[in-house]
Structures are given as C-alpha cells and as structure tokens.
Image (cartoon, rainbow, N blue to C red):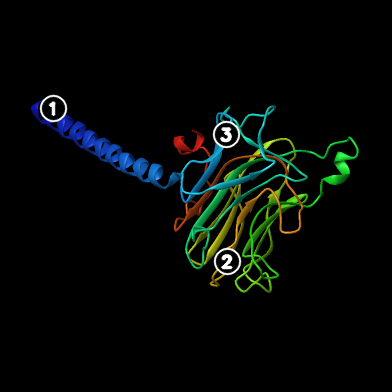
Amino acid sequence: MAKLSSISYRSHSNKTSKLLSRLSRRKVTKKTCDEILLGTMFIKCLDKTIIDETTTHNLIINNTTVSRNLLAPNKTACMEFNGINSAINIADDGSFYIGLEDFTIDWWEYKFSLPIEQPLSSNISTKQALFYKDSLNDKQPYIIYNTTCKSLFMSSNGYDWDIANNKYMGTIQDNVWTHWAIVRAHTNFYTFKNGVLKNIWVSDAPVNDSNSFLTIGKGPNGNNFYGCITNFRFVKCQALWTDEFSPTACELFYQ
C-alpha cells in the first residue's frame, strides 16, 4: 500500500507541476498578447469620440460619426461612414511604411446595403474603398475594395499591382458584422474572413514607400465606404495569425 501511495503522490505531483507550468506559460502568452494587441494604431469609439487608443496618431475626421443606430459586436459604439463624403485621414510618421516587415491589418466591418431612397442611393458607389495608403504614383502601396467580394491590391513600385492584384478576401454580406484580416509573415501573405483563411500567396517584394496619409473610408478617387467600422488595428512587425483563429480569442480585443 505504501508503494501505491508513493506512486499516487508522485503522479499527482507531476500533474500539478505540469499544470503550473502551463499556467505560467499562459500568463506569459497573455502578457505578450496584451502588449502587441493595440499595435501601431487601434482606432475605435470611446463613448461619443473616435480615438486612436495608442494615442500616437492624430486623426483627421471628415463627416465620420459615432453611429446612433448600431453597436459593435461587443456592444460598444462604432464609427459610421455615410458613403458620400466621410473618411478618416491619419498622417504618416513612418508607422504605416511596411517595406519587407511582417504586419497585420484587421478590423470589424458592417457594410450597409444600398438605400432605396433617391437621390442618396445614386450617390453611393457600388464599388467602395475601405482604406488605402495614399501615394503620388499611379498605384497606391495598398488599397482594399468592396464589391460583391473584398479584394486587396498592393504595389512595390507604384506602377503595377505586383504584390497583390485583386487578391480575393471573401464574399461580402451586407448588414452583418464581419471580421477581416490581412497578414504577412516573411514572404507569405494571408487573408482571413471571420478567422477563416481565404487566400494565401507569396511575394518577396517590399511594399512601396509613401509619406502620404493612410485613409479609412474612401479611395483615392472617392468610392466612399457606406457602413460601420470598429477596432481598426494596424500592427507593424507582427504577423498575428498564419492559421485560422477566433477573432475574439484575446479578451482585450473586445474592450
């Protein structure tokens, strides 16, 4: 019996040790997650104000409001874009130059269906740009377009879409919250919709440099976005996901 008791004790001790080890690693992982979670920029609504929670960027807000009728998935306020003349411009201090660095850009989006009323519906484009990095060149460093699906364009030289030419990100459902993400890890590019991998490709070209604005809610020629956005995050030097994931895995993400 003594032998059995000794074995039982050692087994319990080993299990406890392993559990404590896992908990210790979990704490380290959570700390790392919290540290990188806000990234280079994290735009959200706080009460009735649109802010960059990292406090490092000045937001120039043009006719973009805190929505009166819609809440974000975590029941907090969200930004509303009217599809005609609303946008948010963020001056670049080097934060949005990607080059060859790993990066993650992700956000929650609620695209409105086109209104029936005239003339409002005639002023809203069926091809809407969600965000882009401005440039004096013909092709921007990066831009996202919405039609019936979401597409990514990226350029290394300003003259053609050599990194990403109409890369598929997933179909778009109107009037529902959807999480979107673009990630680069080394030379691999990934796109995700609600944590589900939608596309992967390889490019070793650096994303083109530009000291112009990052603009959310419109494209270089208009094509304004009609809908709501929350938790728009730009993470430089971190590829947060290379496998499928839950968009709500980190609790701070929803705060």
Q: What residue is disc 2 on?
A: 210
**Could you say where residue 234 lies in the image, as x and y percent from the top left?**
52, 51
**Left or right: 91 in relation to 85:** left
Of residue 188 and residue 19, the one placed in the foreground of this image is: 188
Between 183 and 232, the residue placed more toward the observer is 232
Eye-nearest disc, 3 or 1: 3
- Check disc 1 and report its element: helix, strand or loop: helix
Disc 3 packing (10 Å; few <14; some 14–19; many ≥20):
few
Q: Earlier in the sequence, mark 3 or mark 2?
A: 3
The span from disc 1 to disc 2 (Cα, nearest Å) is 70 Å
Give residue 15's position: percent from left, percent from top: 24, 35
Q: Would residue 216 be found to the left or right of residue 93 on screen?
A: right
Residue at image position (68%, 27%) is 68
Q: CA distance from mark 3 to mark 1?
A: 63 Å
Dot 1: within a 10 Å radius of its alpha carbon, few (fewer than 14), some, or many (20 or more) residues? Answer: few
Quarter of the figure with the N terminus: top left
Circle on res. 49? 3
